[in-house]
């Protein structure tokens, strides 16, 4: 196959990865296609069956070996050493009123988050509350005890 077709396939896979967030799967297929395209452009691609075998092996091996570490790195906040769970005990400012057990929005560290009121009292917009735990990107908040 022509080298530029592999490059187009690689760019298409990477575009799909960017447009459909969360999975980080197409990244590996796109990178493998770009690598095979580079090999073919250098004249060392070999017959078509070898190109497809190289693409398949590179895609699957990189997917199986690199996806988990990359997902852990992303979930830790991009490798800056500050995990989402480190927000426990921090204070957030409510962006809207929150009844007990209800979900709404709260601001913490300059970002608006989904927040759930885990206390027994309603919380008001602008009130400062404490983060008791996190569930993914959801903050579980409660009125600060005085």
Image: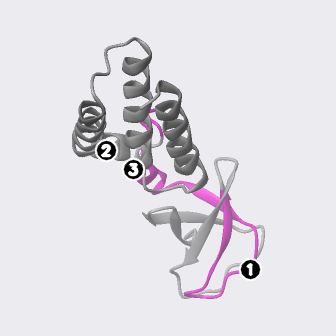
Q: Mark 2 or 3, which is nearer the eye?
A: 3
Q: Nearer the viewer, residue 87 or 36?
A: 36
Q: Which mark is residue 97?
A: 1
The residue under label 3 is 25
Mark 3 Cα within 10 Å, few/some/many (few <14, many 20+)?
Answer: some
What label sits on residue 67 in the rendered view?
2
Residue 57: x %, y % from top left: 22, 38
Q: Position of residue 33 (x, y in %)?
A: 41, 34
- Position of residue 12 relative to residue 126, above or below, is above
Residue 120 locus on image (x, y percent): 54, 88
Is label 2 in contact with label 3 (beta carbons under 8 Å)?
Answer: yes
Query: Which residue range is magenta in the image?
Result: 78-107
In the picture, the quarter occupied by the C terminus is bottom right
Say how the picture is coloured: one colour
Camera-near label (3 vs 1) is 3
Residue at 56% of width from left, 76% of height from top?
116
Mark 1 or 2: the one toward you? 2
Q: Residues within 10 Å of mark 2 (few under 14, many from 20)?
A: some
Quadrant in the picture for residue 20: bottom right
Q: CA distance from mark 2 to mark 3?
A: 8 Å
SS at badge 2: helix
Q: How many marks?
A: 3
- Which residue is drawn at the image coordinates 63% and 59% (left, top)? 92
């Amino acid at each position: 196959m022509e080298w530029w077709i592999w490059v187009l396939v690689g760019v298409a896979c990477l575009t799909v990865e960017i447009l459909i967030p969360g999975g980080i799967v197409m990244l590996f297929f796109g990178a493998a296609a770009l690598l095979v395209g580079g090999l073919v452009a250098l004249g060392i691609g070999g017959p078509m069956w070898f190109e497809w075998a190289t693409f398949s092996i590179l895609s699957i091996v990189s997917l199986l070996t690199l996806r988990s570490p990359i997902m852990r790195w992303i979930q830790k906040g991009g490798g800056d050493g500050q995990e989402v769970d480190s927000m426990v005990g921090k204070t957030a400012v409510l962006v809207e009123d929150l009844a007990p057990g209800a979900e709404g929005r709260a601001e913490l560290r300059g970002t608006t988050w989904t927040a759930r009121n885990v206390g027994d009292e309603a919380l008001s917009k602008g009130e400062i509350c404490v983060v008791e735990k996190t569930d993914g990107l959801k903050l579980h908040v409660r009125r600060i005890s005085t």
